[in-house]
Amino acid sequence: MSLVRDYMIGTMSSVTPDDSIKKTIIIMYRAELSVLPVVDHQNRFIGTIYSNNILKNIIPESFGFLDSSRIFYEVNEAVENLKSVKDETVDKYMLRNRDAVQENTNMKKVADIMLSNKESLLFVVNEKGYLRGYIERSHLLHYLLDEAENHPA
């Protein structure tokens, strides 16, 4: 039986509810992720912060199709809006949830979650809720490849 811990990435960046939006953006950029886990000071998973949650609060058109003549104006306005929210805390923009999988979860269940909910990344916790890493669709594909090679038709 293949488990999440066999395919997950065990290291990752995270933020706390008290961290600033500025710090969060920098960590997202360096980690090359558009979503980060939010943890308490003991590293227990408590939620997520998506780049979209920040963008929705600074882009006036809220992701609507922008007319090309308005793009320059919208970018400038987004910059100005970001100046006013960059020092706010993650707590204001995060989604509080427990949508994480445990590291001892069967990969078949992860496949079901990712494919039925269209999730591209899931955070991984241990049985006590401490953040252990993440698993994404490329890891799911690797698992499926292993299954195909280990169980040929």
Image: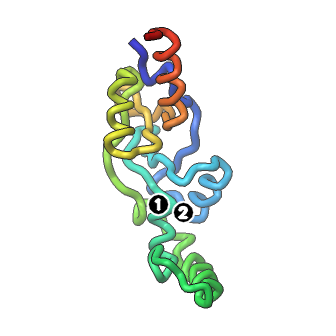
Nearer-the-camera pick, 50 or 143 = 143
Q: Which mark is residue 20?
A: 2
Contact check, label 1 and label 2, Cβ < 8 Å: yes
The quarter in which the C terminus is drawn is top left
Nearer-the-camera pick, 150 or 43 = 150
Q: Residue at x 51, y 60 (%)?
A: 51
To which quarter of the image does residue 83 belong? bottom right
The quarter in which the N terminus is drawn is top left
Q: Few, some or many C-alpha atoms within 10 Å of disc 1 (few <14, some 14-19, many ≥20)?
A: many
Q: Secondary structure at mark 1?
A: helix
Q: Which residue is mark 1?
A: 90
Q: Residue at x 35, y 24 (%)?
A: 108
Return the disc, 1 or 2, that comes first in the chain's sequence. Answer: 2
Q: How is the image coloured?
A: rainbow
Q: Position of residue 121 (x, y in %)?
A: 46, 42
To which quarter of the image does residue 77 belong? bottom right
Q: Residue at x 42, y 16 (%)?
A: 2
Please state which amino acid type lies under the numbered disc 2. Answer: Ser
Please state which amino acid type lies under the numbered disc 1. Answer: Val
Question: Would residue 11 be found to the left or right of residue 96 on screen?
Answer: right
